[in-house]
Image (cartoon, rainbow, N blue to C red):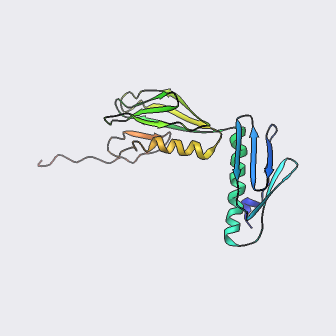
Amino acid sequence: MSRIGKQPVVLPSGVKATLDGQTVTIEGKLGKLTQTFRPEVTITLEGEELIVTAQDDERQTRAFHGLTRSLIANMVEGVTNGYEKKLEIYGVGYGIEQKGSTVAISCGKSHLEVVAIPEGVTVDIHTGQARGDTDPAKFAVKGCDKQAVGEFAAQCRSKRKPEPYKGKGLRYAGEHVRRKVGKAMAGK
């Protein structure tokens, strides 16, 4: 049995859960999330707790048991507190600007990289333009769906990953970029 799967998911006050077969809907102050789970696990609502049980003891079923419990716990956490990913853009002239339901990222290319913001995700721009190598442009991606927030942050970061020589590009806040020393002058 999965140790994680055995733990019940406790619903905090203000969070409502409904079950329809294998489909779980969690509703809270920040939104509403719905997901359908595998038939190998059974989900029951007992009072203010969601309990996930495996139907047999096969290896794959045990894996689905823990996964299902973790996904439901993430849904409850998302509608209660939400998720946030902070990103920074390093590089002279690099920056970010929100245009309606898209963000335009200037990252040293001949054109702006335009990324559509998915539904349920918001972008909060703290500093729109990077100033030199020490003062980056900063923005945060927020939402109640952990997967959508992480996916959109990864899409933005993929437009210009940090390079190892000057450190220019998009990176997560607190991410360490291993720096390389450039070529030494030949013929000394």
Q: Is residue 17 left or right of residue 174?
A: right
Residue 87 image point, x, y percent: 49, 37
> Farthest left residue?
187
Looking at this view, is 78 or 40 the one in front? 40
Residue 92 image point, x, y percent: 34, 31
Residue at 68% x, 52% y is: 71
> Farthest bottom residue?
58
Looking at this view, is 129 or 167 the one in front? 129
Residue 112 picture quarter: top left
**Does residue 155 lie above or below 5 as drawn?**
above
Residue 84 image point, x, y percent: 59, 38
Residue 68 picture quarter: bottom right
Residue at 73% x, 44% y is: 76
Looking at this view, is 176 or 95 the one in front? 95
Q: Is residue 186 left or right of residue 72?
A: left
Residue at 69% x, 50% y is: 35
Residue 3 image point, x, y percent: 73, 62
Q: Is residue 171 left or right of residue 64?
A: left
Whether residue 42 is visible to the viewer of this picture, yes or no, is: yes
Q: Is residue 34 left or right of residue 152?
A: right
Quarter of the image containing the N terminus? bottom right
> Farthest right residue?
47
